Amino acid sequence: MMHLPSMRRGQRGLSLIELGVVLLIMGILGIIVWRWVAATREPMNRTAIMGQLAQAQAAVEGFVLAKHRLPCAASSTNGNEDCGNTSAAAVLLPWRTLGLSSRLGQLHYGVNRGGGVDLAAVPAASPLVTPDLNRDYSAIPVLSTSSDVTTDAAATATVTDAAANASAAIAAALARRPIANGLDWCRGLRQLAANTGAAGVLTAGNLSANMPVAFVLAHPGVNGVFEGNNVVGGAGGWRFDFPDRAQDHGYDDMELAVGPGDLASRIGCVSHLSAMQAEAQGAYTAYDNARVAQEYWSLRVFDIAQNLSGVESANTAVILAAMNLALAAANVALSVASAADTEGITIFGIALAAADAVAAGVEVGFAAAELAKVKQELIDSRAKELAFRAYMAHLYETFSQSLNAAVLLDQKGLNP
């Protein structure tokens, strides 16, 4: 019985400590909540507003890199883009689609969907923005590999492999033609930049003056109320005011507008599109050179065929000359024998036969020299064809490397 009171006092002491810790934690949480509520209720300053606009701009432009288009505006506060609604009510920033905080749901957002260029739609594949420049490349040939033309198996394999690589590059480029990506969207943006005066192009301004824009963001300012020409459904249907309109007691909205030319520069349209087009142009130049060189290559092969024919003709000439020499020699012998059987020696007949024999011998010499000459020409023509075969392999590889580089840049699109 003597120990029970002391146990109760220990338990009471422990409960007071726990209660103190709980009260301390609740006090800290209360201070945090109070500061958060105070921060959310205090008016935003200019720096904070510009920060929200910059955050929204970065998200909108990042959306292009991921989806190959600008986001549509939202028509409700749920933050989801509504691409089917093109009315004046669809003017809210799609914060949820962009992965932003709901606090940015107060921003208004407009994207150009008129003038024949819908920047919020996935573009159609443009035949002018393709890694092969919409060229119909014909087959890459490999000329004769018969032993009459060349006996160098390594050189033949090299040019055959190079031609196969070039054909594979052509197939890869053709496969990219129907696939649209950010580069095709950039072409639409360029069309908009060249035709900003078309009907339906999104503008920011007022009834007397305006400027074409690709997209625009508007913040209601410190008072949280859209004013000026930013009032939805206002006079003339204007939804966005000038981004640099001066603020006064009746207007404190802040805007950020990006024109088609500025947007093309900001997301890298110019650099990415020009890089792909440059590689494609280089590929076409290499292909054009290869096609011209193929004609010369065919002349090299034809030259070999002509020299082969020349060798055969020279061989025939040597054989005929040898036969003539043999006949002339026989004629000399016959003339000598005939002169011995006659009463008088016919010196003239023997001399004539001897002259024929000498002429036949000279003919044999000329035929042999011509044969040696055409054989050397055949060797030279084969050497020239072999060297040109290596050059053709180089041209084919240059073409396939350039075209493959254009394909890779097309696949890369606007990604860094």
Image (cartoon, rainbow, N blue to C red):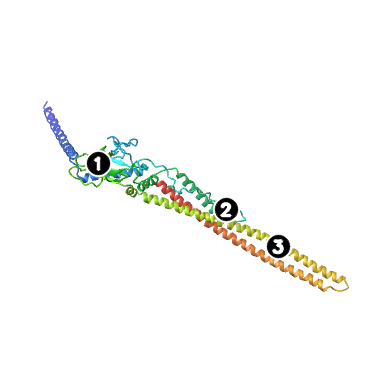
Q: Position of residue 4 (x, y in %)?
A: 13, 27
* Above or below 340: residue 285: above
User: Which residue is pictured at 57% across the width and 58% down the height?
Assistant: 385
Taking 242 as reference, is 66 left or right?
right
Give the foreground label among 1 and 2: 1
User: Which residue is pictured at 73% across the width and 68% down the height?
Assistant: 361
Q: Label 1 to label 3, Cα distance in Å?
A: 100 Å
Type of amino acid under label 3: Ala
Residue 317's label in the rendered image is 3
**Depth check, front residue: 68 or 218:** 218
- Name the residue beneath numbered marker 1: 229
**Depth check, front residue: 212 or 147:** 212
- Name the residue beneath numbered marker 2: 143
Q: Position of residue 381 (x, y in %)?
A: 59, 60
Name the element at disc 1: helix
- Residue 51: name its quadrant: top left
Residue 132's label in the rendered image is none
